Amino acid sequence: MTVQLPEPLNLIGGSWVPAQSGRTLDVVAPSTGKVFTTIAASGASDIDAAVSSARHAFEEGAWGRMSAVQRGRIMIRISELITRDAEELAQVESLDTGKPISQARADMVAAARYFEFYGAAADKVHGEHIPFMQGYDVKVVREPHGVTGHIIPWNYPAQMVGRTLAPALAMGNATIMKPAEEACLTVLMIGKLAMEAGMPAGAINIVTGEGHVAGAALSEHPGIDFISFTGSPEVGVIIQTNAAKNFIGCTLELGGKSPQIVFEDADLDRVLPVLAGAIVQNGGQTCSAGSRALIQRSIWDKVVGRLAERFKELTAAPSEQDRELGALISGKQRDRVQAFISGTDSPLIARGKVATGSPEDGFYVAPALFGPCDPQSTLAQVEVFGPVLAAIPFDDEKEAIRIANGTEFGLVAGVWTLDGNRQQRVAKALRCGQVFINGYGAGGGIELPFGGRRKSGHGREKGFAALHEFSTIKTIVHNHG
Ligand code: NAI
Ligand code: MG
């Protein structure tokens, strides 16, 4: 199919405009390493314009006056339009990110689902009434923050629009999105669909550009009331520092080093495909990637042997070949992942392949399985953000929990055992935001609150929890005598 790529423009106040400087940035296709289009390289003045437009939409424009049910209907229309254009969006997403086409198609199902879920929820968030002293009437109402900033990464651009903008819009905030410079074309395309769906001017502003320029200007801006960030811990610190200077709240989703714990009584036929799948999904460039496999020593040889067989088959290839992995996002990311692979002292157990004939300048990395890894080693502690699985042996439940909790991160974990009491004990003991028992990941899991602890960040996305993050409560006390 021939796709139409978006122009290098920002969406500000309902209009598509170039960066005020007129500058653009080249966009590279990871599968080939070649430049194929450009985006606007925005600066502080573009962010200023977007913040003013959002403020106007919230305080004086049509958006701020809309009822929750009207907001919800527009969002459900966006969901329908994403579904209508899903194939074109998926083609652009796989071109822009290098991911296999079927993974990009699944991303569009999730992106549409976010707008459906939060569109339907918009008019279902109620306040409370508090019994108080005689003569008083007290209600607690939930209100939008006002203008919200959103900075997202390149790994799931379309899904991230849904994940972060949809709950903010459902609550009635006016939004400014700064997507990642590496991949943001579907973000612009969804912006266009939002306008087609009848989204009032200024409710969604999209400003593209570099993180340290446009992203920094947004996170520092005194005109925003809340900021949502997904990306690296290093930038998360900058975001939170800037939020502190403006005395506003933020949510940070900063990745992880998520363990899957395999006990000796686990159903291995179910475990093995999921162990491999959770690290090769999106080439391992997933915040919730299952990047540590904790395996009970009594079944180590059996599990690692079978996992090695699987790893040898895993192949990275151009996105249209739709193998298990595509290219990684950039040369920088490929080099970073390669440096982890060549720099480790942990033994290499098995390595997958890069398909022969893949473009030489594409950013391909063959997946790698290492082990036994020392729980304190780099591969067992640092987020690689690539297709590298660290296998770590343990002797008993206590040790498994200690190793699982023994990193700075705490996002997701998987527990594989058929012992019901152990399932509960371990789930309770894990320090993270989501635990899967006899499974891992949940195909988007829009309904399920998601987020981290410590270096994985704080605040919750998805589910009703996100509606709470993107709103604040006001207590109204009426003394009617
Ligand atoms: P990054 O944190 O630099 O980029 C994420 C977003 O933040 C992008 O939109 C970027 O433009 C923006 N940004 C960058 N610097 C900024 C600044 N000073 N102020 C405001 N916004 C800024 O992540 P990067 O460099 O793309 O990847 C580095 C590592 O971060 C990866 O290897 C991975 O470990 C981690 N990461 C985690 C993600 C997750 O989903 N949790 C997503 C992307 C990266
Ligand atoms: Mg960076």
Image (cartoon, rainbow, N blue to C red):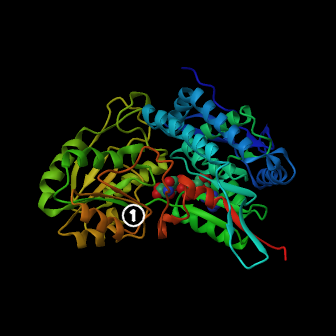
> Residue shown at 70%/68% (left/top)?
248
Residues 270 and 308: in front is 270
| Category of crowding for the residue at label 1, using alpha-carbon neighbours closer than 10 angstroms: few (below 14), some (14–19), many (at least 20) | some
Locate residue 470 relative to residue 350 in the image: left or right.
right
Comparing 340 with 305, the one in front is 305
Q: Which residue is mark 1?
A: 382
Percent x, y of residue 71: 72, 43
Q: What's the amino acid at mark 1?
A: Val
Task: Say above or below: 34 vs 383.
Answer: above
Q: Quadrant of residue 397?
A: bottom left
Of residues 456 and 45, which is closer to you in this image? 456
**Which image quarter holds the C terminus?**
bottom right
Q: Residue furthest right?
A: 60
In this rendering, is residue 197 above or below 205? above
Q: Dot 1: what SS? A: loop
Q: Is residue 144 left or right of residue 302?
A: right
Residue at the extreme top? 1
Q: Residue at x 32, y 31 (%)?
A: 356
Horizontal relation, residue 118 to residue 268: left or right: right
Residue found farthest to the bottom: 133
Q: Give the image quarter of residue 190.
A: top right
Q: In the rendered image, which quarter contains the N terminus? A: top right
Quarter of image, res 366: top left
Q: Where does the image place residue 147, in percent across and percent down from the top left? A: 75, 57
- Residue 101 visible in the current orientation: yes
Residue 375 in view (yes/no): no
Residue 469, given in percent of the width and then of the height, sits at 62, 61
